[in-house]
Image (cartoon, coloured by chain):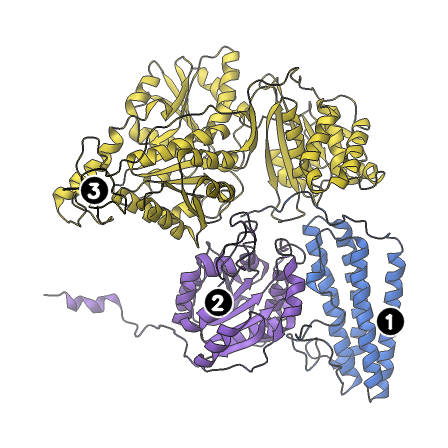
Chain colours: A blue, B purple, C yellow
Amino acid sequence: MSQVQQHDQIPSFDSVAEFFAQALAIEVEAAERYTLLADQMEVHNNREIAEIFRKMAAIESEHRDEVARRAGDALVAGRPVNFSWTAPDGPETTELEQLHYLMTPRQALMLARHNEERAVSYFEAIAATATDPAIAGFAREMAEEERQHVAWVDQWLLKFPADEPGWDEDPDPPLYSE
Amino acid sequence: MNMIPTEVRALKPADYKSAVKPVWCPGCGDHSVLVAFQRAMAELALPPEQVAVVSGIGCSSRIPSYTSCYGFHGVHGRALAVASGLKVARPDLTVVVASGDGDGFSIGGNHFLHACRRNLDLTYIVMDNRIYGMTKGQPSPTTESDWDTAIAPGGTGLSPFHPLVIALASGANFIARGFTGDVGGCAKLIVDAVRTPGFSFVQILSPCVTFRSDQQKAWKSLVREAIVPETDDPARAARRLMTDDGFNLGVLYRGKRLPYQPRPSDNLTPSHFESEFAI
Amino acid sequence: MSKTLQPTTLSIALTGSGGAGVMTAGQILLDAAAHCGLYGLMTRSSGPQIRGGEAAAMIRLATQPVQTPGDRFDLLLALDFENVERFAAELPLDSGSLIVVDPAAGEVPAFLRASGAAVASVPMAKLAKTIAGGRVAMIALGILAKLTGLPESSIIAAIAASIGRKKPEAMEASANAVRLGASEAPDGGVARLALPAEPRSHPRWSITGNEATGLGALRGGIKFVGGYPITPATEILEWMAGALPQCGGVLMQAEDELASINMIVGASYGGLPSLTATAGPGLSLMIETLGLAVASEIPLVVIDVMRSGPSTGIATKSEQSDLNIAVYGLHGDAPHVVTAPLSIADCLLTAQWSVHLAETLQTPVIMLSDQSLGQTRAVIDRPEDVEFAGKRLVLEGDPTNYQRYAQTESGVSPMAIPGTAGGQYTADGLTHTPRGAPSSQARDHVEQMDKRQRKLDRFDFGAHWAEIDGDGDLAVLTWGSSSGPLREAVAAARAAGIQVRLIALRLISPTQPERLAAALQGVKRVLVIEQNHAGQFWRYLRAHYALPDDVVPIHCPGPLPIRPGEALAHIQQGALA
């Protein structure tokens, strides 16, 4: 079992504003990551998946804008006070190695669903451990919002049947360009 | 870190990415290295125009044009030499060198030795996937001896070498290892490497999703944070690195060598030397 | 665009991306055609992605052997249009062409519409889904079978021989998909080739230039290869890695090109005929040690599969721009041999000949192949076997007073192979005495320079130095892979009544002034045609050969191939004198 940095430390917050600043960072990162993934799939001519990821990026961006409003003046230069760019990936951020150039819409949506579920657990954990009832309340709200996202992805998933065997078969060998 | 910014710009990781979309395969570890690099630069608050990224040839070496920094995509194996010249000419720049295990340890092997020895203030990131990806799957100096390839059927039969030991023996001042499955961890190492004066070598295990799809899963379960804290004693580091299984992550050696930086001694004009010839 | 240039050929392009399997499908088409008795060749083009990128397979089928892509495509089958603009310059179509598209691929791109080609729609993706395990590429192959006149059975057999071997359970689905595609193919639109009624009597091969090079090297007696991967030469190394050990030899991957060339110098010094394969950037690295091999008179062969330069250039595209470095690259006066195969089949003969020359003349031979030969697969008549009787002159018998670099009439002196009692000497890049001791004496320098020049001057390279045919006062002078399109253009010119000579050089260096003079007897105008930007071959000829006053240099760089039609236009222009 890997011992690398896991996001299993439940952070504590000194203020509601700080909580929202952290929540904002999570949404920002999630949106940026979806855009990155969409670009990768576009370069590899998988337009269907690129579109799915762009939609997810749009959803996260909306969520981000909303959280930004609530975070208000808790932000310093657009980010939380104790924020570090070298922290592990946020709970809602897709891991880059999960991609495959032939991945199916179902697989892409399952990734998204997994992200939303992790976000649910994250906010629920904060709600459970926060000493400030206001923070706990807002954390519960965030968890509920993420739960709605899970449901929404589930609806979307209904459109796609189970993956066919051979989805990752490519008769052509790898090519090179240099 | 080499430069104190005269004004602190609120730089974000996105500021270090160019508009060029990477052609790396989806799932390639190098995507994570790019993200880690961007985050590291944001953390260091280095203006992109003050950073130069120098590379050789290979999949990993594509990285300069994916950043918004000054980039140099050189010939195969010579990135360290180019970077050395650049750094001596322009000590004010932050110079980051990027390559792969083939480019860096095979054809670049000689330059690797001497870059470590010279100990210029450079940061060298090697994206190690134990294969030649760009040319479709030949073994590299870090490939296992029994890995079957077309050019070496049944495996090379050669033991892979230990780049971290070589770096230590050659005089590198900072030696670390990261894994792309931990983007934040890689970002931290890059920040530390850049901040540490002298030659900083960071090997980042970066699985190749196309030619070695086994690696991502296998490595995820093999890597660990090094249990023993980093050392500044070369002898102790040598012993640890020689017995290292290749999966210990973190800073493994941090030396105390002062970086090498030749400087001009004066500012005379050429006519000063005529007296040498005058009769 | 006139079709009379290629009445017996059919050019087909397949484009698609993201796992569609375009390259494999193209290969299957070529294989099927070959088994029906046709000739042909296949080239490929792709985006920079390692997997899933946009790809184009370009196939030319013919009833007679062809050596080069044609002027235009009769048929383009597009599985999708992802980034297909990338291939715009490589897919010439016109109003006589047919484009078969999947309507799901969206609007036909402007550059394709502009060609005036007819467009037929077949919902290939939808059709594939009606068959369990059906793949779009198989539907496409069925369509192609119908349009080209190849029997469905030949396509299915070709599938069985390739993909079928790895996945036998997919065969039924594939066969059904092929049949379905054939039944849904649009009517007509493409002129079919007449398939031979009886099987060909002459044995034929399906082979790439790189494979032919490897085989030629083996035939020449190579026993050691040291090499480093580089596009587009790596396949030579990978093929020989499998074959050479089975023929009593050894191949080692080196750490870089400096090591490669030095390893083969070492192995050759030890007595084994040795070879390496590389491309322009690698050859640049090898230059210093090539000089060492010249000075110490050590035989070796370097295959340079030329690609578009300079520097990293376009690694996957062809060009003939390494002539200068091959001939002039060494520092000092360092005469050596440079050869260039004239076709894919000729890669075998030229590689074998190059080994023979290296061993006989105890000198490096650089063989200038290129990407268009190396990575194109062609169906060819099995080449005739050639015997090259030359072998290395070694010290045998009484070693008394042995001098490694003794002055001989031919210039070739016996080489002592380590292990030979009494023959010990030190090979050296330093200027040396006949015995091999370092010397700074003027006399030794001049004597050894004369010796090394003399051994090339006095050697009879024989008829292989060039391929010459035809008559008339107009001549086309070319070299290497440019011979392919020129041969086709010359045939068409002659068919139209234009008298023209074709002189295609297989030996670039040393020069053969008397031979070329004889070939140019009566010629008033010479067209020099080559694929590089600076006219390297033309300038080389001007420097070293007597040419008629009227010389027309035609040089265009890669990455696009020289088309027979373009070459014909130049010849027609040249004939208006």
Viewer-nearest of labels 1 and 2?
2
Give the image quarter of residue C452. top left
Rendered image: mark on residue A145: 1
Q: Which mark is residue C404?
A: 3
Q: Which residue is mark 2?
A: B163
Kind of residue at badge 3: Arg
| Vertical arrangement, residue C194 with respect to residue C363, above or below | above
Residue C56 vs residue A56: left or right?
Answer: left
Question: From what the image shows, is residue C304 above or below residue B84?
Answer: above
Q: Quadrant of residue C176?
A: top right
Q: Element under label 1?
A: helix
Q: Chain of mark 1?
A: A
Marks 3, 1 in one chain: no
Amino acid type for the residue under numbered disc 1: Glu
Report whether B37 appears left or right of B55: right
Residue farthest along the top direction in this orientation: C497
- Tag 2, which secondary structure? helix
